[in-house]
Amino acid sequence: MGIIRPLDEHLANQIAAGEVVERPASVLKELIENAVDAGASRIDVSAEEGGLQLLRVADNGAGIQPDDMLTAFQRHATSKISTDKDLFQIATLGFRGEALPSIAAVAKVKCVSATDDSGLGSLLEIEAGTVTTNRETNAPKGTEMVVKEIFYNTPARLKYMKTIQTELGHLSDIVYRQALARPDIAFTFSHNGNVLLRTPGTGDLRQVVAAIYGTASAKAMIEVQDENPDYSLNGLTAMPTETRANRNALTVLVNGRYVRSQAVVQPLLQAYHTLLPLHRYPLAVLNLRMHPTLVDVNVHPAKLEVRFSKEVELRAFVEGAIKKAVGKTAYIPSGTAVR
Ligand code: ADP
Ligand code: MG
């Protein structure tokens, strides 16, 4: 008899979790993405001890039907794509069907969800991949996910977690990017009971920038707005006087998804060219939209990297759009003598 056999589901999930769940912030990213995909207009996030003790994401989105509760936690189970064609034009943030089973393999998860306003919904609890509760419950429309004690059953991983402050930094980063990506969604974020962020959900990006980076920075930002037949770009970018010491305040969104992309950041910096002091970067939030067939998001398990099919054209477009925006401000560098 041969010795090769498929991994059992739990083991396969734990292996996948190694890729998907690097730290509490990766869990938070997946949970917020699910809430966004569910069409929520409110997303409340809370965390305890850097998310290592507890992460909670509650939304008022579409909810999960009782019959789907268990399936949602199965590997490669998704409501978001069903054919190969869908894979080449992804319109949702999620599509791999890997997040929930991976999270449930390395933490204690509680999910309460309802698809309507009847007041009735369902409750599922899973510990290290094993279902411990599955029943009806009272629930408002939407979904509440509570993830406790991440990595409690994988001590080797837990050992690598940094200080609470570092983990909190990563959590905040995730909430900020998602809030910037969706000014139309009202986000709250609290840590150990302290409210750290509240966005109004009015659709006004400047208000979200103000909530995160302060009113002064928000006021000093320039509107970016440009399009060609392939791409559209809109958002806010800083006056060249409002620079920062690192690139962290650059948020690039491609079809609503936060990504790290040199293909967008480099032409942005190029557009400022000599206006930026050495090793200084602008604060910017750029929303780039294109037909989903022009970008491959299925490159990276955490979906942070993407590939563009016409990168040269895209770079030229971004540089041109930023130049136009920054050029309009008739900027005079401070400290330059005006003759
Ligand atoms: P994916 O997002 O890639 O589909 P997930 O494992 O993150 O995979 O979620 C599995 C499924 O569970 C989703 O396709 C969706 O149908 C459902 N789901 C998860 N979270 C939510 C939520 N907050 N609201 C509604 N449905 C959800
Ligand atoms: Mg998902």
Image (cartoon, rainbow, N blue to C red):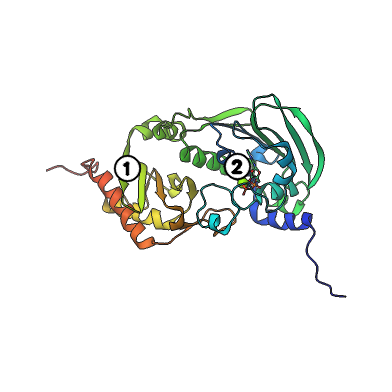
Q: Which residue is mark 2?
A: 34
Please, what is the three-letter code of the amino acid marked with disc 2?
A: Asn
Mark 1 burial class by Cα count in 10 Å: few <14, some 14-19, many 20+:
many
Q: Which residue is mark 1?
A: 224
> Which residue is depicted at the point 39% across and 45% down?
286
Horizontal relation, residue 294 to residue 16: left or right: left
Q: Give the farthest residue toward the bottom.
A: 1
Please, what is the three-letter code of the amino acid marked with disc 1?
A: Val
Distance of mark 2 from mark 1, alpha carbons? Answer: 29 Å
Q: State ligand 1's quadrant.
A: top right
Horizontal relation, residue 78 to residue 12: left or right: left
Element class at badge 1: strand
Whether label 2 lies within 8 Å of ligand 1 gets the answer: yes
Q: Is residue 59 above or below residue 259?
A: above
Q: Position of residue 183 (x, y in %)?
A: 46, 34
Q: Position of residue 53 (x, y in %)?
A: 71, 38
Element class at badge 2: helix
Horizontal relation, residue 17 to residue 30: left or right: right
Q: Quadrant of the C terminus?
A: top left
Which sits in the foreground, 78 or 34?
A: 78
Q: Position of residue 301 (x, y in %)?
A: 60, 56
